[in-house]
Amino acid sequence: MMDIKTMNALFKKYEDTKFEDLDAKDCPSNRPDLVGFLTLDRVCPGTCDMVAAAEHDQIFLEIDPEVFLANATEDTIRILSACGIWYDADYDSFTMFV
């Protein structure tokens, strides 16, 4: 199981990863946001809407950080970073700009 410190370090490590850098096997779509949502749903399956809230040009995602930490890998974080998704500790939420 990954801890929050490791997760934050990995998001920092991959923050400059571009969607174009991902392998085709990681991308069930050509749309970065959709790939990010599908990746999150694979790691943290859910039955509610993915978007929990919005503020100006940022959305907050309905993902339980504890479930994410229990199931995510470094590769998961690399893919999410390339899709523009990161963890915002101030809001205890996964988020992305829209």
Image (spheres, helix red, strand yellow):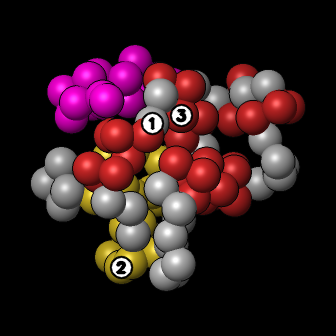
Query: SS class of the residue under badge 1?
Result: loop
- Residue 70 at what x, y percent from top left? 35, 40
Q: Where does label 2 land, which residue?
A: 53
Residue 54 found in image quarter: bottom left
- Residues packed near mark 3 inside 10 Å, few (<14), some (14 to 19) or many (20 plus): some
| Residue 87 - label | none
Kindly identify the amino acid type of the residue bearing the numbered disc 3: Thr
Kindly identify the amino acid type of the residue bearing the numbered disc 2: Ala
Circles 1 and 3 in contact, beta carbons < 8 Å: yes
Residue 8 found in image quarter: top left
Q: Considering depth in this image, is 26 or 43 the residue closer to the camera? A: 43
**In screen coordinates, is 34 left or right of 45?**
right
**In screen coordinates, is 46 left or right of 55?**
right
Residue at (47%, 75%) from the top-left corner?
51
Q: Which residues are magenta?
A: 1-16
Residue 42 painted magenta? no
Q: Nearer the viewer, mark 2 or mark 3?
A: 3
Query: SS class of the residue under badge 3?
Result: helix
- Residue 21 at what x, y percent from top left? 72, 24
Residue at (69%, 51%) from the top-left corner?
35
Residue at (38%, 47%) from the top-left corner?
68
- Residue 22 at what x, y percent from top left? 73, 27
Q: Where does label 3 land, which residue?
A: 76
Q: Nearer the viewer, mark 2 or mark 1?
A: 1
Q: CA–CA distance between discs 2 and 3?
A: 23 Å
